[in-house]
Image (cartoon, rainbow, N blue to C red):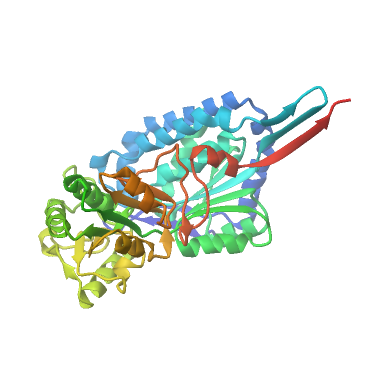
Amino acid sequence: MSKMLQCVSPIDGSVYAERPALDFNSAAVAVARAREAQRDWAARPLSERISLVMAGVAAVGAMNDEIVPELAWQMGRPVRYGGEFGGFEERATYMSGIAESALAPLVIEESTQFSRRIEHRPHGVVLVVAPWNYPYMTAINTIAPALIAGNTVLLKHATQTLLVGERMARAFHSAGVPEEVFQAVFLDHEVTSGLIAGRAFGFVNFTGSVAGGKAMEQAAAGTFTAVSTELGGKDPGYVMEDANLEAAVDTLIDGAMFNSGQCCCGIERIYVHEKHYTDFVDRAVAIVEGYRLGNPLEQDTTIGPMAHRRFAEEVRAQVSEAIADGAKPMIDARRFGPAEGAYVAPQILTDVTHEMRIMRDETFGPAVGIMKVSGDDEAVALMNDSQFGLTASLWTADIDRANAIGAQIETGTVFANRCDYLDPALCWTGCKDTGRGVGLSELAYGALTRPKSYHLKKA
């Protein structure tokens, strides 16, 4: 009997969708279909692959009116924000636009004596294991360049967003991408690990927890399968004494609270120069007190439930522990009404320290700690005091200063005077327990292909 994968809606705790997971043999058949189709797909002209991928993207956009409430039911994001198609399309469009130059052979010599070049060859079958927090945008980061580069793709989506992979595949197939070339598959952890261990894939992309990333690497051990991971984060913001305070507060608090704090590069800890500290906290509290926590299907809801009750319980635990250890809650949670199940009232904590989990462990929810700092040296030391390294947000009028501080921070991306944005022209990467990998930018095509050299002596 097949194992059933269930999406339990955070709105009311009901089972919103369920699908049977493939057993190992059925999953292996899907892989075999993808492998058999890959050669013909890669043989198509690059321009044709680009056109088909972008037609698939447009087909997803045509479904957006259905997708937005469907996402609210699956993972709780309020419908007022309109879904993810803007970023989804932006990323795919950029990657299609640079494909010809990024995938062009590197010609070393073309003379009467020698032809020497390096070509980009697809890995073959790519497995994309996508997360629930931004289920469309995170998936397209790899799917679009992987398909464009000539790979076939199996998409295993998070159980919490069970219907996303199915819908994406339906859209791409309707646009002319062959069914064997892009498949949405329902897999449990055991079958996924078994496929990876059995060298089913040429490349694996995983976005999720640190534990999940370790499991992927362990499954791939000894297979020489390339594994790219984006895992946990505890992204800091640092507000300097010369910062635009109003912009810093508005942007950093939105970065901490949007999507109920469930953003890969969301702000989870804030360090403010002592000159601005009190004013920053006061302004931040005023912003958060203006939120409306509630049913994400209602247009006036600004902050919805977290994706699952267990995620909410972790946030509540971190906040409670911090308060017990001396942190001061700046938000009266009672103003948001009963916050039960997956619903969590947003919280700002002061008097926090790095001995508290709220400033050390990934929270991934609508709670942020704010600390006062005396200057750059203290701020840099605190920002680097983390097992994670995805992004850091610096706020200053002096870009030279931002560059100097940014060079000292152990992170994948440095922002100045903005945060919580993924620029498709820049490499999306992390360090430390955030994992290793390359997403988007020209470098993504290097990751999703292997180099093949030609050294031809002409007779």
> Residue 280: image x %, image y %?
16, 55
On-image quarter of the C terminus: top right
Vertical relation: 386 (above or below) 137: below
Vertical relation: 37 (above or below) 290: above
Q: Residue at x 33, y 54 (%)?
A: 262
> Residue 293: image x %, image y %?
18, 54
Vertical relation: 371 (above or below) 120: below
Numbered label tally: 0
> Residue 400: image x %, image y %?
34, 45
State whether residue 343 appears in this view. Answer: no
> Residue 442: image x %, image y %?
53, 37
View extreme (bottom): residue: 325
On-image quarter of the N terminus: bottom right
Judged left or right of residue 266, residue 407 is right
* Residue in front for this viewpoint, 382 or 163: 382
State whether residue 325 appears in this view. Answer: yes
**Where, by quadrant of the figure, is residue 36 drawn?**
top right
Q: Residue at x 40, y 39 (%)?
A: 423
